[in-house]
Image: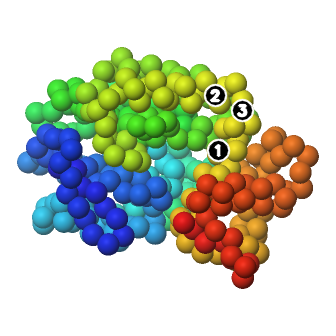
Amino acid sequence: MPITFDQHDVQLTFMHKLPAGVTFLERGWLSSNNVLICDDAHAILVDTGYWTHAQQTHALVAQALQGRPLTHIVNTHLHSDHCGGNAHLQQGYPQVQTFIPPGHAPFVDQWDAAALTYTPTGQHCPPFVKTGVLNNGDCLPLQHTTWRVHAAPGHDPHSVVLFNEEERILISADALWENGFGVVFPEIEGIAAYDEVEATLDIIEQLQPRLVLPGHGAVFSDVPEALARARSRLAQFRNAPDKHASYAAKVLIKFKLLELQQISIADFMTWAQASSYLQLLHASYGAGMAYTDWVHTLLAGLEKAEACKLTHDGDIVNL
């Protein structure tokens, strides 16, 4: 049962039939999509959205569960838009078990916001606790159906995807969307990761999913076309790294605008100065421009694309 969520209500859509026990919660871009997988004994939520939407996420999950307890949280990776609701749901369901990819597990135990990328992105994630980790080849604890974990580095070095082997349904997180994939964050830090993106796309192709439940956007079934678009985008980034840098910087800015909706330019520049990822991108691709001028150029590009508006009162408004 796919469910599309906006700020006002929940709408049911029936474009793609999902197996019994699988509920797809389509969100916007601030929060990742959520997938709820249930059998008689388990209710597993894959990804929990951004922290500012935590109450909405809880309400959607409770509506879908109809009084049943949530038994597990599974995170495909630990970007704030995928695990920001963990802490709230752990409070609401005290017995819930939470499983994460292993790469960042020590930083969750220590709660190192810098190592978890929340500080460098200028984002926030309330601290949560983990129960265990998702290793490559593990299966979710479900009866009569196999959802297998596959390592999927690239967008994040520790990301995973989940594949239902009987129904050939892929929960792709940010490794594959209908029109591309997520920012390749290791590249921001100067760590080569385009080969990992390519390898993950190859893994997805080998799995031959008939249906993909992405981390953002709608469910889709034309997987060969989506893979072709993703590979074309990857080739563009390889050939022109500055295009990926500009894309990454605009995504970071747009995400903050989605969170705040409106902010003064002065306050925004204070946030931008504190974002080490933006600082890294400017250092490598700023073409000799002063940092503030470079950020204003990015804002102008977003305004031209009608993604934001700069007001005469000195505010930036999300569109």
> Which residue lies under the disc numbered 1?
247
Q: Which mark is residue 236?
A: 2
Asked if disc 1 and disc 2 are in contact, CB closer than 8 Å, the reply is no
**Which x, y percent locates residue 54?**
39, 67
**Which x, y percent locates residue 218?**
34, 46
Between 306 and 154, the one nearer to me in the picture: 306
Disc 3 is placed on an element classified as: helix
Q: Is residue 301 left or right of residue 289?
A: left
Q: How many marks?
A: 3
Q: Is residue 281 left or right of residue 210?
A: right
Q: Is residue 7 above or below residue 25?
A: below
Between 64 and 3, the one nearer to me in the picture: 3
> Which residue lies under the disc numbered 3?
241
Q: Which mark is residue 216?
A: none
Which one is earlier in the sequence, the residue at label 1 or at label 2? 2
Disc 2 is placed on an element classified as: helix
Q: Is residue 30 above or below residue 191?
A: below
